[in-house]
Image (cartoon, helix red, strand yellow):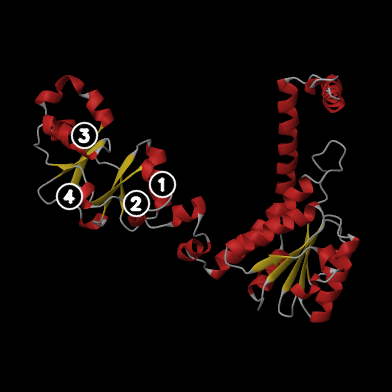
Amino acid sequence: MLSKADTPGNAARKAAATRAADASPAVSTVELLSHGRTVIQTEAKALGDLSAMLDERFAEAVRTILATPMRVVVTGMGKSGHIGRKIAATFAATGTPAIFVHPAEAAHGDLGMLVAGDTLLVVSNSGNTAELRPILAHAAALGCAVIGMASRAESLVIRRADVALMLPQAREACPANIAPTTSTTLMLALGDALAVAAMRARGVTRERLQALHPGGAIGARLMPIADFMRGAEHLPLVAPDRPMREVLVTMTEKSLGIAGVVDDEGMLIGVITDGDLRRHVDRLLTSTAREVMTRRPKTIEVGARAGDALAVLAESRITALFVVDAPAGARREGQAGRPVGIVHIHDFAAPGPV
């Protein structure tokens, strides 16, 4: 009687794993890095060629998108279809209403997703994919504008397009020049270029982007810093002549690893961090806040976004940041503004605003 480990199914799987291991050639790290860099360099060169090829047809395509009464409908087959889905999502995320329609499914009843007033954006490397014929014919019957993206000038897509966007005929990064790699990178980049150019031409604001990205990391970064900051009751503030013994008590009570030093006007003139404590450890018991503080501290304006604060924290390699409300022109020399709140790096890891 066979044990579970010796069943025919397990034995077959073990044999297959052994054959796969034996068939896999030993490849050095140097070779693998070389393969990876070759792919990236191949695609980077093609992107440079694409940039050089942009001409008035690109501008015409953007104007067509801006003038579209309804939506941009993106279509493409196979790997081009996967890129098309991303392009449609990028349009929608940047202020241009857009959807993706699979061309084969369109021919089986989904043609109704394309309506008069839409602009059809067709993505195809060869430009001759047979599945694209029905949706191109339907677009023509509806009078929809067609933007074609392909690499062959005499292809079906380019011939049927009102605006033709040519892709460079670049070699695929695949060694056999078969698997879509370079071509899909080019399509994705050109789609991004169309979406961002349309966004900028529309004057889409950060507030509009926030409305389109209410969730996830993007939404959090676009939220006002006031939604994350801890208010006045959490501020670890001390006077310049405060003995460091008392400053340590304040820092311990607030548990933020920082204290702000404010003058008689309530303006921030310096900060004391855990790093400052270590640098002055030999004289903490005899010093005042003024003698230990770091002058000209990093701050963030109360009207800033969470992403701005995160950038300051990362660039300055600090963990806490005072939020101030005084405009630069109203400050005296040495003043950083009036502190109204504080943010800690951990505040941004929370599921929602503090």
Q: Residues within 10 Å of mark 4 (few under 14, many from 20)?
A: many
Front residue of this view, candidates 274 and 14: 14
Quadrant of the rendered image containing residue 193:
bottom right
Measured Cα–Cα span from mark 4 to mark 3:
22 Å
Q: Is residue 282 above or below residue 317?
A: above
Chain-order first, disc 2 or disc 4: 4
Q: Residue at x 74, y 78 (%)?
A: 115
Estimate the spatial distance between the alpha carbons at disc 1 and disc 4, rounded to whole Å.
29 Å
What label does residue 350 carry, if any?
1
Q: Position of residue 19 (x, y in %)?
A: 87, 22
Q: Residues within 10 Å of mark 2 (few under 14, many from 20)?
A: few
Closer to the chain start, of discs 3 and 2, is 3
| Residue type indicated by callout 2 | Val
Q: Position of residue 248 (x, y in %)?
A: 17, 32
Q: Earlier in the sequence, mark 1 or mark 3?
A: 3
Q: CA distance from mark 3 to mark 2?
A: 20 Å
Query: Looking at the rendered structure, which numbered label has been put on residue 252?
Result: 3
Q: Which residue is mark 2?
A: 354
Residue at position x 49%, y 60% in the image: 214
Provide the residue designation for mark 4: 267
Q: Residue at x 73, y 54 (%)?
A: 83
For marks 1 and 4 on the same chain, the one whose residue lies earlier in the sequence: 4
Query: Considering only order in the chain, which callout, 3 or 4, is on the residue closer to the N terminus?
Result: 3
Percent from the top left, x then y, of residue 343?
Answer: 32, 46
Q: Quadrant of the N terminus?
A: top right
Residue type marked 4: Met
